[in-house]
Amino acid sequence: MFVQELEPVADSLGLSALIAALPLVTVLILLGAVRMKAHRAGLIGLAVAVLVAWLAYGMPLGQTLSSGAQGVLFGLFPIMWIVVNALWVYRMTVRTQHFDILRRSFGRLSDDPRIQALVIAFCFGALLEALAGFGAPVAISAVMLVALGFQPVKAAVVALVANTAPVAFGAMGTPVVTLAQVTGLPLDSVASVVGRQTPLLALVVPLVLVGLVDGKRGLRETWLPALVCGTAFAAAQFVASNYVSAQLADIGAALAGAAALVALPSARKPAAEPVRAAVLTGVRSEDLDTEDPGREVMRAYAPYALIVVVFSLAQIPAVKSVLDGATQVFDWPFLNVSDPDGNPVGANAFTLPLVSTGGTLVLLAGILTAGVIGVHARVALREWGATVHELRFAILTVTSVLALAYVMNLSGQAAVIGHFVAAAGAGLAFLSPVLGWFGVAVSGSDTSANALFGALQVTAARQSGLSPELLAAANSSGGVLGKMISPQNLTIACAAVGLAGKEGDLLRKVLPWSIGLLLVMCLIVVAQSTFLLGWMLP
């Protein structure tokens, strides 16, 4: 048995923490300063983590490699299993042109560009984040806005800022699922607290968006639709994450926000021509005037309806029990680790949810989607293979980062850093979202940031007397605000709207909003750690 130590290097907590931080520092420097590709930085960081665990922390090499292998498996299944199948559904709608029908349908909901920004960037972007994540919402939303006549820079900025509130529950809840796994906290507990933080952002972001689109006039004239949309989104995200399913949180929120806008009479009023002339300074796509048959419009919406239905049915107790029956639990080979108190760690056993996991449910919805929108089985299989190929570097990045996280967690590196950071005391509540924000800003992924810093946050919380669930959730909730300034997302946004090489200009426009909203989240977490908003926590 390998027993974790808190002062393995020279009997010094500070020196042990410094050595333990080397893998994280390596990844952050390679990504942020050297600008190395994320999958290469992840592999190098993993190699450093293995060396630190083996040589400095005394973890047997066999157990070190075994812990990394467990991280790789978790990265493949269920994490990338969800992402691949979700993006596969989207690719099939693009192939059959039902995505274009959906885009035209959104364009006809309102001719007011401020409302269009809410429907497309905020609501539909959240739906795309729920299904795929990993940059897809920014790219697709920005392209749709440009097609409606938005100036490219404005379209990119709006898409980036909108991609905040849904990120923590993106890709069918992948970030919070990862957070629960690496921290050992129950998924329901983590999702519940995140669901009491990010909805507060959802109240603010739509107001920011209409301000970005049309300045003070936009706020003055469309504050009510923005507030109604944000409130409906926030309420649905809160209810789903706390009482239904973390995987359905963004889907429900996106649909609720869009439905609230459609139901609001003032949101459907034609925009004044001066507004359209001032905002829509780009070139409008000609195909927006194409009339689509009602049957085809229904089929365009069908994939998203099917996902909601499949996931809803999976939450019925009787069905859930049957699905859980296929879950496999087994002792992980060559791994026998206990914490500093001598208690065996949970990773000694591995749980493999074969059917009940989100990725399998999305796969089922995708098979049904192929039938509804008319994709031949051979074509659907080819598209699935193309999706895997498209995501090959993302798969390598996620698996290497999760392997790094598992090595750090099981060797005791994360625990040592957490004990050292706990010296910040009450200040941890303010700094916790900042750590998540920094992780996402560098890695471009809330999932990766949770894998890297989740266990650290929990250890620090327990040492300082704060709620582990609060700080773990704060890591994810603060992280969503780093998404808009991550090099990965900036590059995707620029490429989508034809502004390649202008990432610096885009960064300067979104950075103030990223920092400003981060400050709001920090204050929320501080208040939730005290009597001011402590009543909000479950």
Image (cartoon, grey):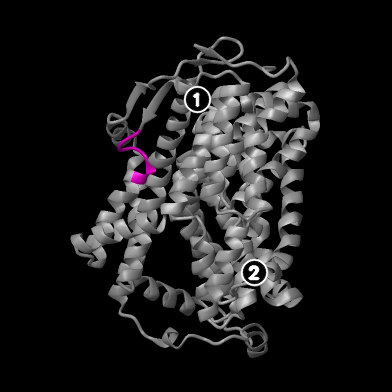
Q: Are marks 1 and 2 in contact (CB under 8 Å)?
A: no
Q: Which dot marks residue 79?
A: none
Q: Is residue 170 above or below residue 422?
A: below
x and y percentages locating residue 316 in the rendered image: 34, 38
Q: Could you tell me which secondary element the residue under label 2 belongs to?
A: helix
Residue under the image location 60 percent in, 35 percent down: 454
Number of residues whose C-alpha sits closer than 10 Å to that of mark 2, classed few (under 14), some (14–19) or many (20 or more): many
The reply to whether the magenta stretch includes residue 463 is: no
x and y percentages locating residue 25 in the rendered image: 67, 40
Q: Is residue 304 above or below residue 422?
A: below
Residue under the image location 73 percent in, 14 percent down: 11
Q: Is residue 276 above or below residue 331?
A: below
Left or right of residue 73, residue 340 in this image: right
Q: Can the viewer see residue 475 in this picture?
A: yes
Q: Which residues are magenta?
A: 353-359
x and y percentages locating residue 134 in the rendered image: 50, 55
Left or right of residue 375, residue 23 in this image: right
Q: Can the viewer see residue 526 in this picture?
A: no
x and y percentages locating residue 212 in the rendered image: 69, 71
Given the image, on which type of amino acid does mark 2 rest?
Val
The residue wearing badge 1 is 64
The residue wearing badge 2 is 157
Number of residues whose C-alpha sits closer than 10 Å to that of mark 1, classed few (under 14), some (14–19) or many (20 or more): many
